[in-house]
Image (tube, grey):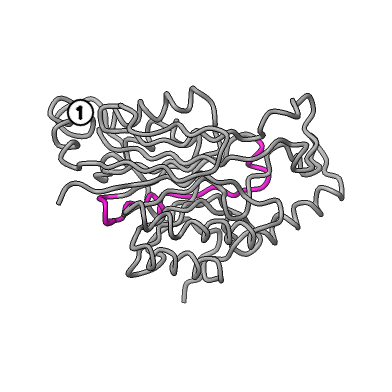
Amino acid sequence: MNKTKISALQIGSSPEGKQATLEKILSYENEIIQSGSQLVVMPEALLGGYPKGEIFGTYLGYRIPEGREKFEAYYHNAIDLDGFECQELAGLSTRTNADLVVGVIERERNTLFCTALFISPEKGLVGKHRKLMPTGTERLIWGMGDGSTLTVVDGKAGKIGAAICWENHMPLLRTAMYSKGVEIWCAPTVDERDIWQASMRHIAHEGRCFVVTACQVMASPKQLGIVVPEWDDERALIQGGSMIIDPLGNILTGPLKNQEGLITAEIDRSDIVKSRYDLDVVGHYARPDVFQLIVNETERSTVSFCK
């Protein structure tokens, strides 16, 4: 059957830490079941947090001790892929019978990655995508992913892939993912701006795929106890804007602003075939005699041991 339901869960990381955030996610179990969704996409860095406005004590050329302490606290709020949080998310997926795409801060040794996890009701964690290029000062706290996690999985609602926040603006990444046959493009983010929503509509229209973008929503800096210079205390730190878009760039639901919630849309995968009748950017609308893309999907490691 081609028709199914997909959702975006718009919530924010709790200032109380990852356990409180996990409890917030789990509190939506009944709503997910009632929605009948087979896919739920959650925002970037939801488990682990997006420290908007934090400088981690870094100035060009030096770092102050207080910044190291803040990074240590952030490190301990990240998650391990074999840890309790992933087990709980797998249980949620099983109970709701929905695939989950969840933005987390992943901890590997002493490096943090901004990662999207793919979780299935039957198998639990089935894949991950690490953000290839952290944006701006995100590079202070996150490592870079590599081509080995350009992941596409067969989900209940279709072929699911993900790109995180501003890496959605990387044309070659998009081309690589389109070539993998993505049918539902998942875009966890903390970008709340109108231009982001325009980008999401463009990707749906360009890739002729459904797009689900899930954005955090977070209270004002004053309410969170965060000092952000020249910030209007009444304005939310992150205002949300989650939405679901069809393969011709039409908004099916959203954008949801300034509140938490689950938004859901019914989709028909046959619309993908219809939409690609006149545009398939890695098929009949491509020119491989003029343009070609080479993608390195090998896992990159600093140290390799040979015996």
Viewer-side residue, 139 vs 15 = 15
Range of the magenta residues?
A: 137-159
Residue for point 54% across, 54% down:
104
User: Quarter of the image holding residue 139?
Assistant: top right
Q: Relative to 284, does residue 52 appear above or below in the rendering? A: below
Q: Is residue 155 left or right of residue 271?
A: right
Q: Position of residue 19 (x, y in %)?
A: 63, 63
Residue for point 63% across, 59% down:
78
Residue 140 included in the magenta stretch of the image: yes
Q: Is residue 297 left or right of residue 88?
A: left
Element at label 1: loop
Q: Position of residue 171 (x, y in %)?
A: 38, 30
Where does label 1 land, which residue?
286
Q: Residues within 10 Å of mark 1 (few under 14, many from 20)?
A: few
Q: Position of residue 306 (x, y in %)?
A: 47, 72
Residue for point 56% across, 70% down:
83
- Amino acid, disc 1: Ala
**Tally of marks:** 1
User: Quarter of the image holding residue 233?
Assistant: top right
Q: Position of residue 273 (x, y in %)?
A: 14, 37
Residue for point 31% across, 54% down:
36
Residue 274 included in the magenta stretch of the image: no
Q: Relative to 2, does residue 241 appear above or below in the rendering? A: above
Point out the residue furthest to the bottom here: 307
Viewer-side residue, 127 vs 195 = 195
Q: Is residue 235 left or right of residue 255?
A: right
Q: Relative to 185, does residue 26 appear above or below in the rendering? A: below
Q: Is residue 35 left or right of residue 135?
A: left
